[in-house]
Image (cartoon, grey):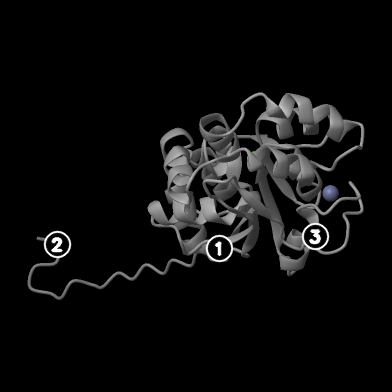
Amino acid sequence: MLFAGAARPSVRVWYLPRPVKPLLIACDFDGTITQRDALHVIVERYGERDLWATLAPRVQSGEITVEQAMQEEFAHVRATPQEAQVAVREEAPLRDGFHEFVAWCEDLGHRLVVLSNGFRSIIEPVLAGAGLERLEVVSHDARFGAAGARLVWSDRGPRCDLCNRPCKRQPLRKRWNGERLVYLGDGISDRCASRLADMVFARDGLAEHLRREGVPFVHFDDFHEVRAVLARAVGAGS
Ligand SMILES: [Mg+2]
Ligand SMILES: [Zn+2]
């Protein structure tokens, strides 16, 4: 035998992974982390489905703001917080691979922030139900009740320099410490914030918008794809 009677030479393998600079990853909730927009699900089940059709033209003409339209819509939503949460769990489940994506971010020290125009009273229980209550959530809020829901808008600071409205761009800027920035989203509320990012993952309306504007993005269907693309981009195993 090759090493009979002698101590086996010890073989040391020194493995130094390429250091990965932490990213700031900002991720929309409705229709991005979830497979469907949680707010649509709640309005469909407990509100007046056709009300938005009469509100949208008033928003477009400038008669009322988006926030006023949403308040009007949710004033007709008669549900307890628990009923609203159950509707979202049943009809807007988390997109595939989100758990694994969170674990990957945590392993490599990337900071993941949920940046939503939706409501804390929905987002936090949904994340907690999935064992992800530790994620940072930036959002508005809603008080659900039998007499209708009342929306509580968080202060988003000065108006956005792109859309001239209180949008996600300002809270994202506030959290940015010079890291490379990744943004994931699907809708109108993601447009301005996504323009701050070094790399954008988009689907649905946001993808169509960025395509029209000629802004590069990566289309995604689930978070396994996001993790694989990001792992290649930052040089860390997926
Ligand atoms: Mg969305
Ligand atoms: Zn904006």
Furthest-front residue in this view: 147
Which quadrant is the N terminus positioned in?
Answer: bottom left
The picture places residue 232, in percent across and down from the top left corner, at: 57, 47
Q: Give the CA separation, mark 2 to mark 3.
A: 67 Å
Q: Residue at x 74, y 24 (%)?
A: 53
Taking depth in this image into account, of 210 and 138 the one nearest to the observer is 138
Taking depth in this image into account, of 93 and 83 the one nearest to the observer is 83
- Figure check: 216 above or below 167: above
Q: Is residue 107 left or right of residue 64?
A: left
The picture places residue 72, in percent across and down from the top left corner, at: 72, 40
User: Does dot 2 land on a helix, a strand or a loop?
Assistant: loop
* Amino acid type of the residue that numbered disc 3 sits on in the rendered structure: Gln
Q: Provide the residue designation for mark 3.
A: 170
Q: Earlier in the sequence, mark 1 or mark 2?
A: 2
Q: Give the CA separation, mark 1 to mark 2.
A: 36 Å
Q: Provide the residue designation for mark 1.
A: 18
Q: Provide the residue designation for mark 2.
A: 2
* Amino acid type of the residue that numbered disc 1 sits on in the rendered structure: Arg
Disc nearest the viewer among 1 and 2: 1
Q: Earlier in the sequence, mark 1 or mark 3?
A: 1
The picture places residue 190, in percent across and down from the top left corner, at: 73, 44
